[in-house]
């Protein structure tokens, strides 16, 4: 952060009043000029904020020092970090959503560089396409972006814009500002949301939906109850919900209580004071610009805290405050959260920077926790990652990696330079993808269910979608050099290295080897045995979980 940037930002802030502009100039040049000054304004305001708590003195990264003090306070002795194989599998899946290949894993294990974990993390974060393809699912869920339920053109996907934004690692504040202030050529599909057919309840009109989604995803505040009446579950009032919704409407909104008009008009007003106002009679462009600034400006700490908390939960299975959509609860470790949020702002809202901090922390590299705390404030929440199931997309991609068979499917309308169609690109997920947790995205999905369900068991045991993948995978492998390998024990070893990142034990070889048959047999007669061998591996909890 240079002095020149800070000085420029102060001048811009003084001219613009920082928080909210007046009526926006409609020309493209004016819009480009506005975005050009965005970073200077953000840096200047960050520099003006009080400094966050600092970690205790000592060796190691800041996150580790914060948690070392926390553990010492609770008389907890942390365990050793996981071995290289477990770390590599964990970080590959968390950053690019794919398993490491046997060759990549072997190379990493034999690397003698003391900083090899940092170099691995850096190389994965530098894999632009792998990173973008994996994190598409995360953001599609949050932004309820989808193409499968676009009935009668009632929703407008933002898939191409979202993919390019992730490919470029667009700063998160600018990313969100473009969503909230899309302009003529921007991602206006986010604010349009899902326009339901037929009669729509007043609490589900597009402007009110926008307010609910923005407050939940970017401010960890629940307005759904307050969109109908004063909330019974938190402090938000009907007037506040409509005040935020009016930023997404071309005119002030009449408030409806329990779907009945009240005669009261709500002008645009942000949820939190001191972040700016919008001029009376402002047009929709000015309202969008105002709310984009109010949500993302550094003086609104909830935005940065909410974003880093979502990243923390994505990697460790549980947020620093829970539930992640309710910032009104007490954070598990507030000093660390304050520091991470400020550091996020200081580094220009760079998601990859914050991800790197977390990925290389001792708590992320610790063994998974199987403890189930009795309350949200119990100590086990900060001793290591929670054991997590592979997401629907990770699981299906992992199957394709092991078998080499990538199903052809109707894909989303986005250009991706990858001949393999990864699961996130399926326009309409099959029964297995849905059973494993991919949502229909008609509602915001900030976290997927981690519990096993009867539907999942049925699909995994005898569902046609998995059966088709097993058939295609077995056929592909039998047609490869593996199908003619005389020593089928070597094939078992290779499969285990691909699927689980380790060699099989003697009992596992003895169990799987007979299923593969003899190379002298015709491939058709061996097909079913290979399918059974693959099915057994894919049912293994060691394959299905991130540990």
Image: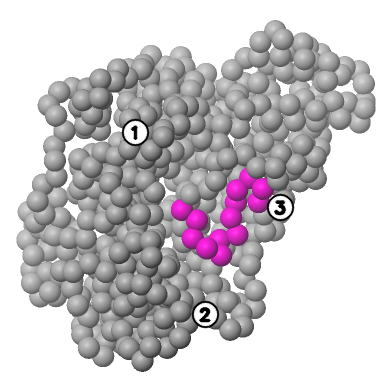
Q: Earlier in the sequence, mark 2 or mark 3?
A: 2
In the picture, measured across the screen, residue 503 lies left or right of residue 351, that is: right
**From the viewer's perspective, is residue 414 above or below residue 511?**
below
Does the image show residue 453?
yes
Residue that appears at 76% across and 46% down: 465
Q: Which residue is mark 1?
A: 378
Question: What range is drawn magenta here?
Answer: 434-446
Residue that appears at 92% across and 27% down: 525
**Residue 167, label in figure:** none
In what element is the residue under mark 2? loop
Does the image show residue 191?
no
The image quarter containing residue 527 is top right
In what element is the residue under mark 3? loop
Mark toward the viewer: 1 or 3: 1
The Cα atoms of the two marked residues, 2 and 3, are separated by 31 Å
**From the viewer's perspective, is residue 34 above or below residue 199?**
above
**Residue 201, label in figure:** 2
The image quarter containing residue 298 is bottom left
What is the x, y in percent for residue 99?
56, 32
Q: Which residue is mark 3?
A: 430
How many dots with numbers?
A: 3
Mark toward the viewer: 2 or 3: 2
């Amino acid at each position: 952060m240079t002095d020149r940037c800070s000085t420029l930002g102060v001048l811009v802030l003084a001219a613009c009043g920082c928080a909210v502009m007046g009526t926006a100039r409609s020309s493209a040049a004016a819009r480009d000029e506005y975005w050009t000054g965005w970073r200077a304004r953000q840096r200047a305001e960050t520099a003006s904020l009080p400094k966050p708590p600092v970690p205790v003195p000592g060796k190691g990264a800041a996150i580790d020092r914060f948690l070392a003090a926390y553990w010492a306070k609770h008389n907890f002795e942390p365990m050793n970090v996981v071995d290289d194989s477990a770390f590599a599998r964990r970080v590959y899946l968390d950053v690019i959503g794919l398993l490491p290949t046997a060759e990549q894993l072997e190379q990493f294990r034999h690397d003698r560089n003391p900083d090899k974990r940092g170099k691995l993390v850096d190389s994965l974060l530098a894999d632009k396409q792998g990173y973008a393809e994996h994190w598409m699912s995360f953001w599609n869920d949050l932004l309820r972006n989808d193409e499968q339920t676009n009935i009668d053109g009632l929703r407008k996907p933002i898939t191409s814009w979202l993919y390019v934004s992730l490919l470029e690692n667009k700063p998160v504040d600018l990313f969100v500002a473009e969503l909230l202030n899309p302009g003529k050529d921007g991602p206006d599909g986010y604010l349009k949301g899902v326009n339901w057919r037929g009669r729509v309840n007043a609490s589900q009109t597009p402007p009110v939906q926008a307010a609910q989604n923005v407050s939940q995803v970017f401010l960890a505040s629940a307005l759904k109850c307050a969109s109908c009446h004063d909330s019974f579950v938190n402090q938000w009032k009907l007037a506040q919900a409509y005040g935020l919704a009016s930023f997404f409407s071309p005119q002030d909104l009449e408030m409806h209580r329990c779907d009945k008009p009240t005669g009261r008009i709500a002008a645009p007003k942000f949820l939190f004071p001191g972040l700016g106002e919008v001029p009376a009679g402002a047009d929709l462009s000015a309202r969008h610009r105002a709310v984009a600034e109010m949500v993302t400006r550094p003086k609104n700490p909830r935005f940065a805290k909410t974003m880093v908390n979502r990243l923390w939960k994505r990697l460790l299975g549980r947020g620093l405050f829970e539930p992640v959509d309710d910032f009104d609860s007490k954070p598990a470790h507030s000093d660390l959260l304050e520091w991470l949020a400020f550091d996020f702002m200081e580094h220009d809202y760079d998601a990859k920077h914050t991800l790197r901090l977390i990925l290389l922390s001792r708590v992320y590299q610790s063994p998974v926790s199987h403890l189930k705390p009795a309350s949200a404030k119990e100590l086990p929440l900060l001793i290591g990652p929670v054991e997590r199931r592979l997401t629907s997309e990770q699981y299906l991609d992992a199957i394709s990696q092991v078998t080499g068979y990538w199903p052809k499917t109707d894909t989303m309308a986005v250009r991706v330079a990858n001949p393999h169609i990864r699961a996130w690109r399926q326009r309409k997920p099959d029964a297995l993808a849905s059973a494993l947790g991919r949502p229909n995205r008609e509602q915001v999905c900030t976290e997927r269910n981690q519990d096993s369900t009867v539907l999942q068991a049925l699909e995994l045991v005898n569902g046609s979608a998995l059966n088709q993948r097993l058939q295609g995978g077995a056929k592909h492998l039998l047609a490869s050099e593996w199908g003619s390998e005389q020593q089928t024990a070597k094939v078992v070893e290779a499969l285990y290295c691909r699927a689980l990142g380790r060699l099989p034990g003697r009992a596992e070889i003895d169990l799987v080897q007979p299923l593969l048959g003899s190379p002298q047999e015709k491939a058709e007669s061996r097909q079913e045995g290979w399918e059974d061998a693959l099915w057994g591996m894919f049912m293994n909890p060691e394959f299905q979980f991130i540990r």
